[in-house]
Amino acid sequence: MSEPASAERRRTLRDWLKVLTLTVGLPIVIALMLFAFLAPSFGSGPKDLPLAVAGPEAAVTQLEQGIQAQSPDAFELSTLDDAAAVETAVTDREAIGGIFVDPAGRTTTIYTAAGNGTPYANLLNTMAKGLQAQGQNVETVELAPLTEDDPTGAGLATLGLPLAFGGMASAAILIFLLRGRPWHTLVGSLAISLVAGFVVAATLQYGYGVIDANYFMAAIAVAAGIAATSLCVAGLGSLIGLRALGIGAILTIFVSNPLSGLATGWWWLPKPWGEIGQYLPIGADGHLLRSIAFFGGHGAEHAWGVLIAWIAVGIILNIRGGVRNQKRDTVEADNREPVNA
């Protein structure tokens, strides 16, 4: 067999192998994508939700037994000293709600915080109705109400799109337009994220009334979420090229977004997925924006730390890419210089 014919045969074989790989690989990717979105949804529900309680020991014991009987394993109760401590636990986002039993036994106060996510408030309101049906005097106090324009909190669930798209799209465009110029990419990523943060926050607050917060802080929070993804993907692109877009897309769309708990709050997701999501940009940013919008910024420390860490990693990747490119350009320039005889 001639050499050209042999080469053509090898090429044909490689092409068929590519077809076989795509035929097997893409359905697997689709199945994994479906799993990434369905698994958290089907496993979600009340499980070990942090609930603060206070009151006379006998009343609290009876309350705990009643809750355990009605909703086994739904709550993880922490017993505090008084009503003020319960309120603080809720407003600091250490608990999804709280219950205080009056020492005189006349009133049971249930504290809800819809800003954490409507499922928790609905669950506690249902509990209040159950206690009222038993003849108890129950009072409900909402500590973190949603806005009148978005009473169900559905608007916050849309935050995932600008965070994912803003981070990935800006990184992709910068990688294509500024390939080999990581310093320009670094500045461009930060600038785009900052402007996008103010635009998204303005749309949420002034356009649709989803949040009612300190606009500047909300804008910075959204910008941090976009920058965390954009900088990391762009920085990775300066080191490994276009492959960074595939890695970034997988982590952002198939991992960070479904594990973010944007629609319900991360406690509603099955363990440990909810906790894992809080260490990724979209989940951390969703928790951060809820803290700013409904809790006066309380309970935001962890989320700020996570986003700052991602941004720092992205900056380091871009700097490393810039240094590497400078060294490469220097070597190439030296090689092009004529050698004196």
Image (cartoon, rainbow, N blue to C red):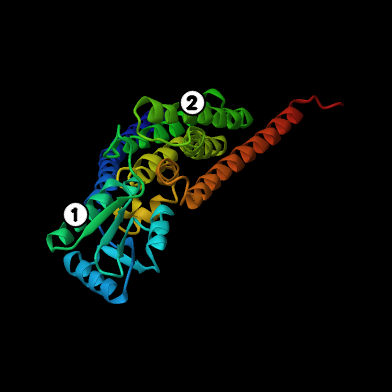
Q: Secondary structure at mark 1?
A: helix
Q: Give the residue displayed 39% in from the left and 50% down from the top.
A: 277
Residue matched to label 2 = 173
Estimate the x, y position of residue 325 in percent, counting from the top left: 65, 34
Estimate the x, y position of residue 40 in percent, counting from the top left: 27, 50
Q: Give the residue displayed 30% in from the left and 66% down from the top.
A: 102
Q: Is residue 83 left or right of residue 171?
A: left
Q: Amino acid at mark 2?
A: Ile
Instruction: Choose between 25 and 247: the one closer to the eye.
Output: 247
Q: Give the residue displayed 27% in from the left and 41% down from the top.
A: 30
Q: Is residue 276 left or right of residue 125?
A: right
Residue 152: image quadrant is: top left
Q: Quadrant of the C terminus?
A: top right
Circle 2 Cα neighbour tier, 10 Å, few/some/many (<14 / 14–19 / ≥20): some
Instruction: Choose between 42 and 141: the one closer to the eye.
Output: 141
* Whole-number angstrom distance, CA of label 1 to CA of label 2: 49 Å
Q: Is residue 332 left or right of residue 27?
A: right
Identity of the residue furthest to the bottom in this view: 58
Instruction: Choose between 264 and 337: the one closer to the eye.
Output: 264
Residue 1 visible (yes or no):
no
> Can you tell which mark lies on residue 126?
1
Instruction: Choose between 6 and 192: the one closer to the eye.
Output: 192
